[in-house]
């Protein structure tokens, strides 16, 4: 015994287990025979678990009574439900198990009552329903329809947003006799007004507007263009997303590299007054990129040139003419105006941020080249191009004691300034003078038999042969003669040794202060 359910997502064939659940099978067969399930909605969809149907109005309708058994339909509300049979051998173990939805009896919790609603499982091992739903059949065909119901989009209560309903029922085999008063309709009845009121989105509603491919492609391109324009506006490449290219500018390409601005201006000037004519050239080499822009004063002149100059031969090249789609000049004008307004208000660069105005790594603020007026260019400042050694020479190289002091005489040489470079030059001059003296030779030893060593120590050499050389350096850092430094560096004494000894004997008797000094 089998029943065919025609649903909005496909046909489902159910085999009935009349030997295990005769009462449930008879109720289900007779309800299908009178077309009771027609237009019943599918509800309570739980993915990979189950769905429920069998109520002609559905749970969302206020007038719904939850459905009735065949005996309640024929005899009245007193027989709306009947006791369900829960066979212990029947389990919800596989997908497609069909069972009657039941509720506990008000006076006897061990007895469960069934009416018209039934449950179909959408997954395996749904043993939670054992003892709560009375199994009476199983799905043998139509698992693709079950998959569509399982993947349907639902609200939080499990109701599909697009209605899934039982359209028609057909009994393939009925072993039961009809109860008294049952009348089978000759055809499926149309849905009632109450049923039509429960429709959310009809299953046959055409959600996609029927448009041809060309129109759909046009709509897609317009949507993509708007999205790209909005992106360019956020990046600052466009002043605003709805900007349109000027209608009085022509774009000319396929030019001969020898064609100049003056040639194009002369040729196109017969259509009207030309505001600007520019052949685009490479910034580094200056070679023509073989396309140009011609701006007319009048829109009509631009249109006339567009129709007349297509495929015209210029310098042995047939040119292509089209209306310009570039808005770069408009963007530059807009940026310049906005920045000027911010400067007048005392603000910085973009967004009025002062820090953005100060950061100028690659260009000078007020520098505009003569041959490229009004365009953005990468210009390095003089400070960036100047070398490190040149900057050091400009700051203090002329007053230093390195190369500039070597050409001076000994008495005119300035005192060396501090620093490792100046100390190294001073040591090199001292070694050279030492080698030129009679006592110094190439063997690296001086007249006292000691090794010559370069020393960067600031201590002065008190040997007699260095005193003469140091007398020429008795000057301060500004080149003036310093008597105190000269006298302090003088260690020779022309007095008689007897006078020197007398002074030393006199110093011994002066007391503790002189002794402390002597020590």
Image (spheres, grey):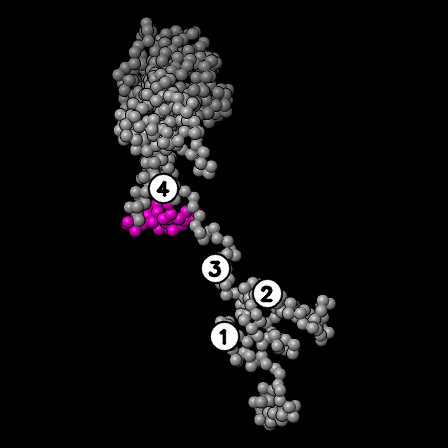
Residue at image mark 1: 480
- Estimate the spatial distance between the alpha carbons at disc 3 and disc 1, rounded to whole Å: 24 Å
Residue at image mark 4: 373
The reply to whether residue 276 is in sight is yes
Say which of 348 and 475 sits in front: 475
Graded by Cα atoms within 10 Å as few (under 14), some (14 to 19) or many (20 or more), the crowding at tag 3 reads few
- Estimate the spatial distance between the alpha carbons at disc 1 and disc 4, rounded to whole Å: 55 Å
Q: Nearer the viewer, mark 2 or mark 1?
A: 1
Which stretch appears magenta? 344-368
Q: Quick check: 472 above or below 175?
A: below
Residue lying at 34% horizontally and 10% vertically, measured from the top left: 34
Nearer-N-terminus badge (2/1): 2
Nearer-N-terminus badge (2/3): 3
Residue lying at 30% horizontally and 26% vertically, measured from the top left: 270
From this viewpoint, which residue is outermost toward the top?
186
Q: Could you say whether the residue bearing mark 4 is in a helix, strand or loop?
A: loop
């Amino acid at each position: 015994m089998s029943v065919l359910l025609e649903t909005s997502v496909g046909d489902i064939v159910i085999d009935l287990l009349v030997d295990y659940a005769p009462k449930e099978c008879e109720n289900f067969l007779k309800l299908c025979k009178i077309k009771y399930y027609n237009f019943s909605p599918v509800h309570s969809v739980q993915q990979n678990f189950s769905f429920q149907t069998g109520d002609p109005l559905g749970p969302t309708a206020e007038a719904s009574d939850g459905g009735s058994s065949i005996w309640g339909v024929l005899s009245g509300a007193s027989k709306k439900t009947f006791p369900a049979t829960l066979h212990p051998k029947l389990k919800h173990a596989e997908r497609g198990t069909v069972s009657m939805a039941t509720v506990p009896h008000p006076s006897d919790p061990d007895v469960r009552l069934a009416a018209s609603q039934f449950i179909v499982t959408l997954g395996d091992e749904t043993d939670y329903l054992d003892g709560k739903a009375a199994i009476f059949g199983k799905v043998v065909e139509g698992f693709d329809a079950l998959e569509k119901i399982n993947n349907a989009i639902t609200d939080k209560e499990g109701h599909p947003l697009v209605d899934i309903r039982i359209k028609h029922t057909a009994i393939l085999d009925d072993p039961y006799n009809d109860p008294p008063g049952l009348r089978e309709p000759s055809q499926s009845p149309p849905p009632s007004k109450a049923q039509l009121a429960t429709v959310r989105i009809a299953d046959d509603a055409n959600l996609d507007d029927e448009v041809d491919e060309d129109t759909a492609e046009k709509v897609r391109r317009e949507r993509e263009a708007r999205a790209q324009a909005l992106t360019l506006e956020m990046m600052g490449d466009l002043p605003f997303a709805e900007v349109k290219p000027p209608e009085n500018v022509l774009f000319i390409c396929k030019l001969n590299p020898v064609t100049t601005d003056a040639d194009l201006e002369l040729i196109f000037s017969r259509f009207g007054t030309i505001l600007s004519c520019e052949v685009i050239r490479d910034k580094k080499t200056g070679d023509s990129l073989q396309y140009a822009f011609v701006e007319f004063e009048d829109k009509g002149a631009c249109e006339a040139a567009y129709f007349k100059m297509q495929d015209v031969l210029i310098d042995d090249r047939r040119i292509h003419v089209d209306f310009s789609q570039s808005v770069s000049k408009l963007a530059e004008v807009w940026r310049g105006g906005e920045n000027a307004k911010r400067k007048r208000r005392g603000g910085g660069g973009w967004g009025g941020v002062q820090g953005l105005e100060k950061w100028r790594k690659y260009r000078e603020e007020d520098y505009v080249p003569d041959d490229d007026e009004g365009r953005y260019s990468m210009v390095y400042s003089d400070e960036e191009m100047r070398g490190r050694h040149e900057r050091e020479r400009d700051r203090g190289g002329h007053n230093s004691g390195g190369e500039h002091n070597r050409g001076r005489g000994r008495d005119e040489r300035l005192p060396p300034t501090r620093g490792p470079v100046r100390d190294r030059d001073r040591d090199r001059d001292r070694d050279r003078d030492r080698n030129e003296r009679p006592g110094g030779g190439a063997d690296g030893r001086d007249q006292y038999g000691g090794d010559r060593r370069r020393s960067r120590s600031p201590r002065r050499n008190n040997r007699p042969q260095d005193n003469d050389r140091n007398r020429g350096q008795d000057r301060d850092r500004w080149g003036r003669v310093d008597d105190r430094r000269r006298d302090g560096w003088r260690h020779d004494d022309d007095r008689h040794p007897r006078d020197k000894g007398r002074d030393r004997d006199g110093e011994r008797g002066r007391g503790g202060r002189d002794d402390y000094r002597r020590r």
